[in-house]
Image: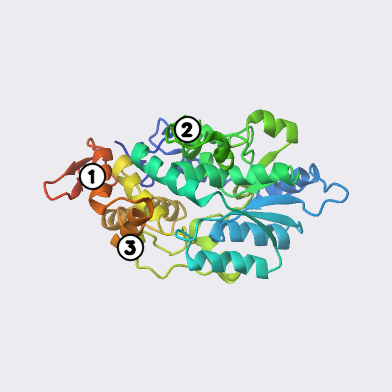
């Protein structure tokens, strides 16, 4: 395990390759942003939008996936108020046991601001069963739900015949998931290859006893379907020089976004602006830390370090203190939902711990072997 010489990105992030100088892809990209002409990029965006004129009788110029969170709220407001477009907002709804009141209020905020929002809701029993199956097989309950979340937007784009899909950040450039890189910095049609969506075959879902007809919401449209309907995903983050966790949060709070009040010890959320529509992603962030050696706090600190808002040493302190943070109440609620005990939960997590990076003590505590910022 090695760390980027600039930030706290480890080379254990899936699909990440450091430069020969030991710099992660995200820091390498950040260096190149210093030479970007942002007015030129805005003009590129205008030219790009002109390639997708609204069809006669069509109400919407584009489609944006929204959760009511910081990134999607900023996108919706910026696209309407800055670009003058009329977007259709697409929201995949969590079941009542999972969605937070905060998340419902944030979607309501977008509706109250005049946006058209179409909400899709996969069958809750199938959703619940797949979450259990994904946790049992991958120790990643979101393996199925993320497929549904990512698939819902292009599916609805096809349904409403809206070819232009506007997305947020480019995970290849801004996070380092290099398999998602497209023909240009804003081309998002390779989003299907990101680590979250990899292994998208339905085999494991079918093996869990789910009927193929019930899996339609979990099927990302094929490249052939993209071509047949002329779909194009465009990363808006490529055009915005101030795109970041903190900036998007501040922009969206000014637009009515309700943020978290949990302490960082419960969530690892330094600003209270992530995963606002549900709480169980916090479990997956903790488990990600035990698998790969980095979690939510690492992602926060990396961005703040690149932007010059945080010293690397301060980032190390925060990562050491909070990268595996997760409130026990969230674990209890999740276990109750999928029908397991907390003992079963921790047994599954312990079985998935990366033993090259961590030790498991006799009392169940998980301790890192590596030094944050230095590695093994």
* Location of mark 3 (residue): 266
User: In what element is the residue under mark 2?
Assistant: helix
Image point (75%, 45%), residue name: 162
Q: Depth check: 100 or 270 in front?
A: 100
User: Residue 264's quadrant in the figure?
Assistant: bottom left
Q: Residue at x 23, y 35 (%)?
A: 356
> Which residue, given by chain and number where applicable, does mark 1 sit on?
347
The mark lying in front, picked from 1 and 2, is: 2
Residue 249, horizontal then vertical, whole percent: 52, 63
Marks 2/3: CA–CA distance: 35 Å
Residue 360 shown left or right of residue 82 in the figure: left
Residue 363, x across and y down, in percent: 12, 50
Alpha-carbon span between mark 1 and mark 2: 25 Å
Label 3, residues with CA under 10 Å away: few <14, some 14-19, many ≥20: some
Residue furthest to the right? 56
> Where does label 2 land, which residue?
206
């Amino acid at each position: 395990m090695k760390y980027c010489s600039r930030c706290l990105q480890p080379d254990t992030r899936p699909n990440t390759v450091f430069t020969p100088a030991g710099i992660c892809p995200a820091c390498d990209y950040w260096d190149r942003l210093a030479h970007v002409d942002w007015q030129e990029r805005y003009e590129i965006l205008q030219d790009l939008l002109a390639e997708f004129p609204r069809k006669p009788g069509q109400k919407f110029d584009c489609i944006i996936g929204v959760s009511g969170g910081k990134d999607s709220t900023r996108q919706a407001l910026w696209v309407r108020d800055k670009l003058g477009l009329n977007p259709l907002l697409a929201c995949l709804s969590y079941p009542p046991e999972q969605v937070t009141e905060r998340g419902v209020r944030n979607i309501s905020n977008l509706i109250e601001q005049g946006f058209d929002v179409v909400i899709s809701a996969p069958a809750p029993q199938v959703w619940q069963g797949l979450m259990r199956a994904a946790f049992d097989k991958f120790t990643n309950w979101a393996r199925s739900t993320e497929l549904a979340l990512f698939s819902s937007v292009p599916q609805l784009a096809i349904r409403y015949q809206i070819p232009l899909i506007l997305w947020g950040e480019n995970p290849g450039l801004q996070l380092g998931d290099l398999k998602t890189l497209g023909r240009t910095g804003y081309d998002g049609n390779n989003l299907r290859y990101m680590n979250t969506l990899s292994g998208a075959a339905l085999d494991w879902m079918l093996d869990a006893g789910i009927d193929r007809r019930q899996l339609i919401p979990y099927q990302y449209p094929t490249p052939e379907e993209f071509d047949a309907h002329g779909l194009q995903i465009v990363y808006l983050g490529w055009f915005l020089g101030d795109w970041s966790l903190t900036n998007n949060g501040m922009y969206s709070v000014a637009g009515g976004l309700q943020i978290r009040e949990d302490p960082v010890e419960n969530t690892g959320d330094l600003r209270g602006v992530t995963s606002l529509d549900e709480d169980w992603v916090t479990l997956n962030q903790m488990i990600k830390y035990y698998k790969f050696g980095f979690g939510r706090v690492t992602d926060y600190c990396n961005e703040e370090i690149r932007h010059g808002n945080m010293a690397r040493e301060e980032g190390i302190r925060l990562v050491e203190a909070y990268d595996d943070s997760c409130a026990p109440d969230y674990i209890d609620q999740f276990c109750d939902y999928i029908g397991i005990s907390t003992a079963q939960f921790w047994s599954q997590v312990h079985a998935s711990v990366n033993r090259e990076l961590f030790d498991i003590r006799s009392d169940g505590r998980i301790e890192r072997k590596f030094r944050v910022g230095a590695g093994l």
